[in-house]
Image: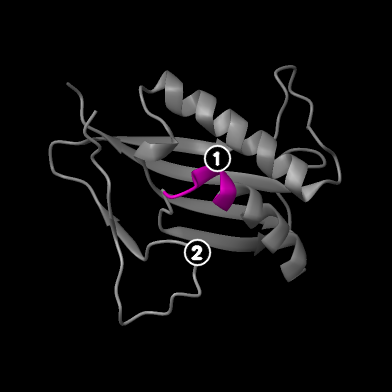
Amino acid sequence: MSRAVTLIRSASLSTAAEYAYAATAPAEARLVFLAGACPLNEDGSTAAIGDYAGQAAKAVENMRIALTAAGASLEDVISTRVLVASSRRADLVTAWKVVRDAFGDHDVPSTLLGVTVLGYNDQLVEIEAVAAVLDS
């Protein structure tokens, strides 16, 4: 299947960032805007309380489910924003590594943010994403 997302890199920018700096999709692509993927279990309880990596993994799992329901996959994601309820860089990096590993070679443009609080009790991580797909 042909993918709509083209990742863009520049030799003029640092390679320290573990993602492409930009991405494009053709005009005929269907955009999929996902609500923030939260680390919630099916019953609404928060998964992996107190565990940044565990919550990031659950958020990725839930994001995959939402993408599938929209006819997309992680390889169709064009950008992400990872929100982590912490002021400690180490906590942000812990969550980021899980998200980054889930995307593998599809290293989409991403923003990692430390925030004061997220919407659910005991929630530490949330992942926002936009995807682009070519419908056959």
Q: Position of residue 38 (x, y in %)?
A: 64, 37
Quadrant containing the N terminus is: top left
Question: In the picture, residue 20 is in which quadrant?
Answer: bottom left
Q: Nearer the viewer, residue 5 or 129?
A: 5
Instruction: Give, as a three-letter code, the residue at label 1.
Output: Gly
At label 1, counting other C-alpha atoms closer than 10 Å, the crowd grade (few under 14, some 14-19, many 20 or more) is some
Residue farthest to the front, as pictured: 105
Measuring from the top left, give residue 70's x and y in whole percent.
Answer: 38, 23
Residue found 45% across the figure and 36% down from its top: 34
User: Measured from the top left, where is residue 111 in percent x and y?
Assistant: 50, 61
The residue closer to the viewer here, 35 or 22, is 22
Examine the residues drawn in magenta and state their main secondary structure.
Answer: helix
Q: Are marks 2 and 1 in contact (CB under 8 Å)?
A: no
Mark 2 — residue?
18
Is residue 87 visible in the rendered image? The answer is no
Q: Is residue 48 left or right of residue 79?
A: right
For residue 7, above or below residue 63: below
120 part of magenta stretch: no
First in sequence: mark 2 vs mark 1: 2
Where residue 21 appears, as percent x and y from the top left, is 36, 66
Determine which residue is flagged by label 1: 36
Q: Secondary structure at mark 1?
A: strand
Q: Amino acid at mark 2?
A: Glu
Residue at (86%, 46%) from the top-left corner?
50
Residue span colored magenta: 100-105
